[in-house]
Amino acid sequence: MRFWLGVTDNRWFQHVSASASPEVNFWQPSARAPFTTLPEGTLFLFKLKAPNNHIVGGGRFVRYTRLPLLSAWAVFEQQNGTSSLGELKRLIATHRRDATTLDTEIGCTVLTDVFYLPRDRWIDVGERFRTNIVVGKTYEDTDPVGASLLADLDRVTEGRSIAETGLRDERLGRPFLQRARLGQGSFRTLVIDAYARKCAITGEHTLPVLEAAHILPFAEHGPHHVCNGLLLRSDFHKLFDAGLLTVEPDLRVRVSGRIRDRYFNGKAYYRLHGQILAAPPVDAIDQPNPEYLRWHNENSFVE
């Protein structure tokens, strides 16, 4: 089994461990992509910087993507490891030579099933991780060093951090996403990528106004899966959630007459009535599930 040991900002870890969030954005101050070769579901461990040369927790790799700082905050909020957008901007600026703005793209490594080790169970990596490694390192459980790190992890967690969350499961890559316990941040990130950062209805690609909508609401036990999502411009998202707009199973847009009746307007929306989605996902497995669309048609949409 391959796993990753990533150098972790100590302030980031302090914040996310205090909240015990099961899902986090392990961000990078630049938009480089050192994790894109990892299969989804790979074990990803956190190693603090000196003087704490210890493994302190970890999770499962979901996706690496690049987002402007403002969008990263909108998607993950405090799962970025700070309490506010301003604090996130200041923290990222301490790791960058160039000026940091809300449009600055950062690397976003989304992790789920995150666990945190209590202080008395932190694992001292010693000479198993060279001090000149800046970002992180890949290990194999068949190598002596990798095997010793996993043995230490099993010892301090009594196997729970790996066995109970399925981290030793070899069904990595896309199969992992179909069964993983994803959260809101993972869902939003995967929907953004699946729709190539374009509004499904209009094709609009101004990212700050695009939002990931659940077709079958999470409150109605809708899953955090891409096939239960639509990337929509914020006004279309509001109309969709209010039942004033829907998408039929054949991917055609349907607009309610209530917009005109209630607000004496809506021409911009009625022009799209009957149109097929402008920007559906290319991958068939990511396209809206017809059963979820049918549910929205029958239970949310109002004529």
Image (tube, rainbow, N blue to C red):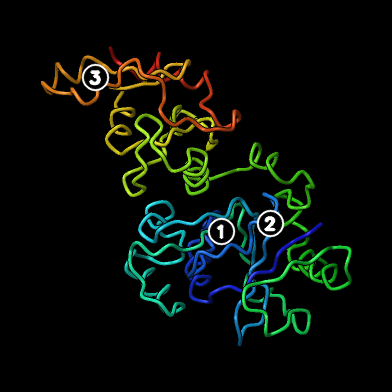
Q: Is residue 110 left or right of residue 44?
A: left
Label 3 and label 2: CA atoms lie apart by 44 Å
The amino acid marked with disc number 1 is: Thr
Figure quadrant of the C terminus? top left
- The residue drawn where x is 21% and y is 26% is 268
For label 3, the residue is 270
Residue 80 as seen in the image, left or right of residue 284: left
How far across and how far down the image is residue 34, in percent? 63, 64
| Residue 163 against residue 11 in the figure, above or below | above
Count of residue discs: 3
Q: Nearer the viewer, mark 1 or mark 3?
A: 3
Residue at (61% x, 30% y) in the render: 285
Q: Which of marks 1 and 2 is nearer the N terminus?
A: 2
Which residue is labeled 2 in the image? 37
Residue named by callout 1:
109
Give the distance between the C-alpha atoms of the residues marked 1 and 2, in whole angstroms: 12 Å
Q: In this view, does 57 lie to the left or right of 287?
A: right
Q: Disc 2 residue type? A: Thr
Task: Point out the tag, 3 or 2, that comes first from the N-terminus.
Answer: 2
> Mark 1 touching mark 2, by CB under 8 A?
no
Single out the mark in the foreground, 1 or 2.
2
